Structures are given as structure tokens and as C-alpha cells.
Image (cartoon, coloured by chain):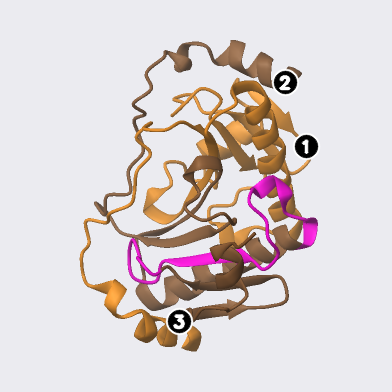
Chain colours: A brown, B orange
Amino acid sequence: MSCLGCDLANAKFTVHTIYEDELVHCFLDINPFNEGHTLILPKRHVKELTELTYEETLAVMDAAKMISKKLNTLFEPDGITINQNGGKFSDLTHLHMHVIPRYENDGFTWSESTIQDGAHKRLAETANKLLRV
Amino acid sequence: MSCLGCDLANAKFTVHTIYEDELVHCFLDINPFNEGHTLILPKRHVKELTELTYEETLAVMDAAKMISKKLNTLFEPDGITINQNGGKFSDLTHLHMHVIPRYENDGFTWSESTIQDGAHKRLAETANKLLRV
């Protein structure tokens, strides 16, 4: 089955590479949230975080740290956000971690969920359920 | 210097623990974006991702995978988002990674930055700069 993420990670398409090793390929997001917005993709076809091997996990996170340092040096942002969206929220069929230079009032907001089901009142109940699964 | 994150990570305050080991403490966010929203904190005082040791990085990511599995089993969300905000966007003086069950139209949106500086037209230039720092 074809996977755009696999093709990007394995350089079948031209990308703007920031870093690459045996396990991961890091390149600029073609539609950056802010300048320097980088994606980290494992080269192996992996969709979810839970599928990453020990070595791949470290490779992804080492890359995230290294890219964060580069972004801090070059852009001196107000902060850096690391984000990985799984399931229906992955816009590739391949795991990709975002490393995003952030600035105040840049619109990256998620403080309030549209789902208001009183979850903040059920913390003890929720924790008990999660401890049992 | 006092740090609320240190106090939370080291159980000086009551939290709703999901998992704990020598290096990390994982507990429910007191103001969950969605039910099951969990925070992973290193026990050592660390503010930025780049400061995490090899062992702490693995401990954080192992916890992220384990909690993702628990959230998937219990809530069957549409996906899971892993998020870590550094610099000014950290609302603690201590690194914390969010693990958030996600549902369609839950309002976690960041597709469009308010900063429109044409960065998508300067990808080659940006990559060249990042390769040099």
C-alpha cells in the first residue's frame, strides 16, 4: 500500500531536509505554522506512537531536541511546541512529530474543549478507571 | 526556588496518579481538555525538553505510549495527541507532556497561524539556515 509519509521519509519526493539518519528523516513542513516548523518521520512505516521501537523512540526524541536547539538559535522564539497527532488527527498515514517555533498570540490554542461533559469533576473516578485498564 | 511542577511530580500535593516510577509521575490534568487528559512530569526539576537525560526521555516516552494504550482501551477516542509546550507556553516552571484523548470537532485547532509572513515561500532558504546552525 502506498504511503505518502513513507515516500517523504525515504526521500522519494524532494523535501527540505534538516536532519537525517538511519531511523528518522526531519524536514520542513510544506505549510509551516511558523517559519522553521519541522516534521520528524520514522523511515519505517509506523502510524501510531505506540508502534515505535525503543531505538526509533530515542531517534525521534533526539531529533526533537536537536531541532529545538537549532530553532532556538536561529529564531529565538518565545517557546517551542512538540506535537504528535494520532488516529483521525494524523494528516498522513505515517507518524510525524511536529516541532514548532512559537510566538505569543500565534493562534496555537487549545485551552478549551468544545466537549463540556464535566470531566474535571470526575478526576478520581477517571483515574480509578485508568488504573484498572 | 519553589516549583509547583516539582511539588506535583514528587507528590507534595494530592494528584490523581495514573502511573509513577523512579523518573516520572503521570497524573490527570486538573482541567482536562477531554476526559483522561494526562500529564507526564519528570521528577527531577527540568524545564525544557532539551534538558532531559537519555533515561528521562525514554521514561517520558514509555509513559506516553503506556498511557495512550490505556486511553485507547478505556475511551476509544478518535485519536490521541501528544503535546509539550516549552518557553513562555509552559504553564508550569517544569516540563510536562500532555497526553490527550481527541474527538472530532473538539476544538484542538492550530492549522492557521496568525503570523502570516510568507514562510511557506522561503522553505529552501529556511532549511539552509537551519542546516548551518
Q: Is residue B72 above or below residue B63?
A: above
Which SS class for mark 3? helix
Tell me the amino acid under the disc marked 1. Asp
Q: Tell me if mark 2 has few (under 14), some (14-19) or many (20+) residues whose alpha carbon lies within 10 angstroms of its own.
A: few
User: In the rendered structure, which amino acid carries the disc numbered 2?
Assistant: Leu
* Label annotation for residue A119: none
- Badge 1: chain ID: B
Read off the magenta span: A30-55
Report the residue at 78% width, 56% height from top: A53
Q: Position of residue B43 (x, y in %)?
A: 67, 42
Q: Specify the quadrant of the image occupied by residue B39.
A: top right
**Residues packed near mark 3 inside 10 Å, few (<14), some (14 to 19) or many (20 plus):** many
On the image, the x and y values in percent for residue B16 come to: 61, 21
Amino acid type of the residue tagged 3 in the rendering: Leu
In the image, is residue B58 above or below residue B7?
below
Same chain assignment for discs 1 and 2: no
Q: Give SS at disc 2.
A: helix
Residue A121, position in %: x, y? 47, 11
Residue drawn at the location 75% of the way across and 17% of the way down? A132
Q: Label 1's element?
A: loop
Q: Quickly name the residue at label 3.
A: B130
* Residue linked to disc 2: A131
Q: Is residue B52 positioned above or below B29 on the image?
A: below
Residues at marks 1 and 3, CA–CA distance in whole angstroms = 37 Å
Q: Is residue A74 left or right of residue A9?
A: left
- On the rendered structure, is B116 left or right of B45? left
Q: Provide the chain ID for the residue under circle 2.
A: A
The answer for how far apart the CA atoms under marks 1 and 2 are is 14 Å
Residues at badges 1 and 3 in contact (C-beta under 8 Å)? no
Secondary structure that dominates the magenta span:
loop
Residue B21's disc is 1
Name the residue: 60% across, 10% down. Answer: A125
